[in-house]
Amino acid sequence: MQSGKNKSILKSIFSGRMLATFLMGFACGLPLLLTTTLLQAWMKEEGVDLSLIGLMALVGIPYTVKFIWAPFLDRFTLPFLGRRRGWLIIAQIALIFSIASLGFTNSVNHPWMLAFAALLVTFFSASQDIVVDAYRREDLSDEELGFGTSLYVNGYRVGMLLASGGGLIMADRMPFSAVYMIMAGCMLIGVLTTLLAREPEITVDPPRSLKEAVFNPLVEYFSRQGAIWILAFILLYKIGDTMASAMTIPFYLDIGFSKTEIGAVVKLFGFWATVAGSLIGGVLMLRLGINRSLWIFGFLQVISTAGFAVLARIGHSIPALSAVIAFENLSSGMGTAAYIAFMASITNKKFTATQYALLSSLMGIPRVLASAPTGFLAKNMGWVGFFIACTLIAIPGMLLLLKFASWNSKEGKPR
């Protein structure tokens, strides 16, 4: 029996659907930093005023309001490639052209043209995110959703790494316009994946009108038992981890670590620890299920946040920093994979794009609001007190699991 389960797990891990999920994650992660990190470096090199560089962050608004046009993508099906792949190929082709056009704009003489081109990139990137999130939910079985999500997250991170680290390295050797052309060409990986992937088989009928696509996802969700508790959980599950992360760079510098040490240990070593955590979390979810994984990974997240308080006591120590970063990024990678898989699992397949867009937008609220007062808290509480507070703040999110995902509960997922 155990052997059969192991074979089933291996079959899921090495399936073509999982490869498609990873590559779609790559295609979604690639455009994100092209309008932030890489664009900021380009504008700075061109001598653009810092105030204008800061204002360019506003072009990221489509990522936070993507739920507005998600019902449109749920309601209408294009006459080619199917309900999901049709919209996906349109978004990806538009992304290729908008990324290339961004590379040909002049940030000094025509900053508003640059802003418009960047806005097009974020709009089509957010649209791609909507469709890929819906595709992943509909294409993978409930049992495969956890591991598939971990692959998606890692593909996303690889895309971000190529755009930021790879893009900056290339920009030292060629013009930024050429870098953006190369990045536009890299999006062809997403196009090929879309063309070769299968269209998900859905047994439920799509919304019959735009009104139904807009309002019915909300009506259906809030008619469920525990709907409010689940929203509270989405807001609170990673709040301690998010608040602690918002102040880690000032913390490292304050206790004596150099920028080189931070870059080598926190960024490079930490990146691979996060990737490993996502993969380990994905494999464990195949065995444990999403509900139990949320408990285990969430508990590890809480402990890892407390690790920063320990580091504050120890002070400057590369071995201690490496241990804290390894544990924190491993647990964070596992927790993120379970968190995103859970959100996907509770969407109704009739309104996947709309409901997931709403939930993922809600997920971003703590990143902005909860992070805002962290500097004030750290200044007044000290580093040890601040990180202990972040640890305690994470506990209510864990306790909310008792309301809808207790340890022995069956995972009830809407179809």
Image: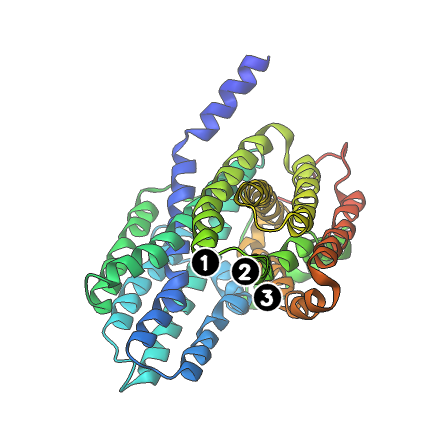
Say if mark 3 contacts mark 2, CB within 8 Å: no
Tag 1: amino acid: Lys
Q: SS of the residue at dot 1?
A: helix
Between circles 1 and 3, the one closer to the viewer is 1
Q: Is residue 234 above or below residue 338?
A: below
In the figure, is residue 136 to the left or right of 191? right
Determine if residue 148 is in view.
Answer: yes
Please name the residue shown 40% across and 62% down the image.
Answer: 33
Above/below status of 23 relative to 118: above
Q: Nearer the viewer, residue 389 or 380?
A: 380
Report the residue at 68% width, 59% height from top: 383
Q: Nearer the viewer, mark 3 or mark 2?
A: 2
Q: Which mark is residue 259?
A: 1
Q: CA distance from mark 3 to mark 2?
A: 47 Å
Is there a contact, CB below 8 Å, between mark 2 and mark 1? yes
Res 177 quadrant in image: bottom left
Q: Quadrant of the C terminus?
A: top right
Which numbered tag is attached to residue 139?
Answer: none
Residue 196 or residue 5, whichever sits in front: 5
Question: Residue 96's spot in the image, x, y percent?
Answer: 28, 62
Task: Say which residue label 3 marks.
Answer: 214
Amino acid type, label 2: Leu
Say whether residue 201 is visible.
no
The residue closer to the viewer here, 215 or 64, is 64
Residue visible at 31% across and 61% down in the picture? 168
| Image quadrant in which the N terminus is located | top right
Instruction: State the separation of the CA atoms marked 2 and 1.
Output: 7 Å
Residue 253 is marked as 2
Label 3 is placed on what type of residue? Answer: Val
Name the N-terminal-most of marks 1 and 3: 3
Is disc 3 surrounded by few (<14), some (14 to 19) or many (20+) residues within 10 Å?
Answer: many
Instruction: First in sequence, mark 2 or 1: give its number.
Output: 2
